[in-house]
Image (cartoon, coloured by chain):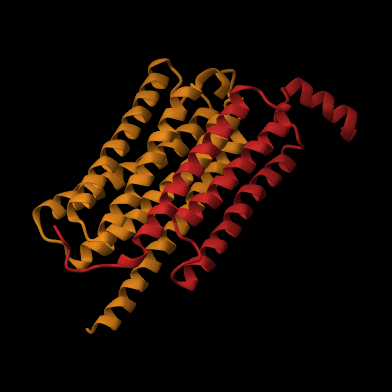
Chain colours: A orange, B red
Amino acid sequence: MNEIEEKAVQEKKTLGFWIYLMTDCILFASLFATFAVLRTATAGGPSGADLFDLDFVLAETMILLASSFTTGLAILGVARGFKKQTIFWLGVTFALGATFLALEITEFNHLVAEGNGWDRSAFLSAFFTLVATHGLHITVGLLWLAIMIIRLVRYNFKKTDLNRLALFGLFWHFLDVVWIFVFSIVYLIGGM
Amino acid sequence: MKIPIVVEHRNADARYISYVVGFVLSILTTLAAYFVVVNHLWPMEMRVYIILGIAVLQLIVQSVFFLHIGRGSHWKLVTYLFAILVVLIVVVGTLWIMHNLDYNMMHMSPDQMQQYMLENEGI
């Protein structure tokens, strides 16, 4: 394959991944719609206003936003041709993403321990399904990120690594975009 | 260590600035939405629309500065717009139809519902 053909193949792969992300949008849309319908169906249990700690969620939001930014910096490291810079920012992204996940698990633990698990009401079922689906994506993203960091540390940069990094960037930015709506609809509006 | 393959080296500074601008605008919109809720600005109904508005604003910011919509493949933009259309149909359609099916009585107890049926539906 010559360079032009290779580039065309890569563009197709990127578009394919992008279309996957767009279908993921539809998955999240149906979960958001479910949450919006069941928001008030608390079955006599606690509502969002009783349960959500907005300061805690704001911290989560800022951490995820920062990790989206550092992903951008890592990709720029590639564009500038610095391997160390890329690995450093990917490491920071991993740390921020892992912190976000740890905070989310802490929140879930707290809710379940107080008897407000997914089995408490339709509202909480919808809440856990939506937020945990996002969390599951984050978990997969972290696994992907860890594998990429190990590869970059152990081996020289290859074109495939650069392409993977670009796709990971799309994935991670996409998850941050979904979280904007989790923050706004579930926590801010759901917590009113 | 230098990487042999240099991708878009010329644009690196412009892209760096674009990420910083996107990051700062995202922080500002997030804080704006947070303060609207914490300080109970505007009546409840109004607040919901304002928060949704701010969320859409941040969606646009991140789409432009982080996801680089509009650059690269033409199909990226087309699929993005189509996804937004489907998302709107799913979410708005669901809320609309569920409200209709429930006769707009989502927040009523069985007693209230019976009263409503007697008064408004002649049942």
Taking A62 as reference, is B8 above or below it?
below
Quadrant showing the N terminus of chain A: bottom left
Where residue A79 sits in the image (x, y, percent)? Answer: 29, 61
Residue at position x 46%, y 67% from top? B71
Where residue B106 sits in the image (x, y, percent)? Answer: 70, 31
Taking A97 as reference, is A166 above or below it?
below
Residue at position x 42%, y 53% from top? B17
Where residue B45 sits in the image (x, y, percent)? Answer: 72, 31
Residue placed furthest toward the top:
A114
Quadrant showing the C terminus of chain A: top right
Residue at position x 36%, y 73% from top? A12
Residue B85 lies in quadrant: bottom right
Residue A137 shows up from this direction: no
Residue placed furthest toward the left:
A154
Residue placed furthest toward the bottom:
A2
Residue A10 shows up from this direction: yes
Residue B82 lies in quadrant: bottom right
Q: Is residue B121 left or right of residue B111?
A: right
Residue at position x 77%, y 26% from top? B113
Where residue B6 sits in the image (x, y, percent)? Answer: 24, 67
Total numbered labels: 0
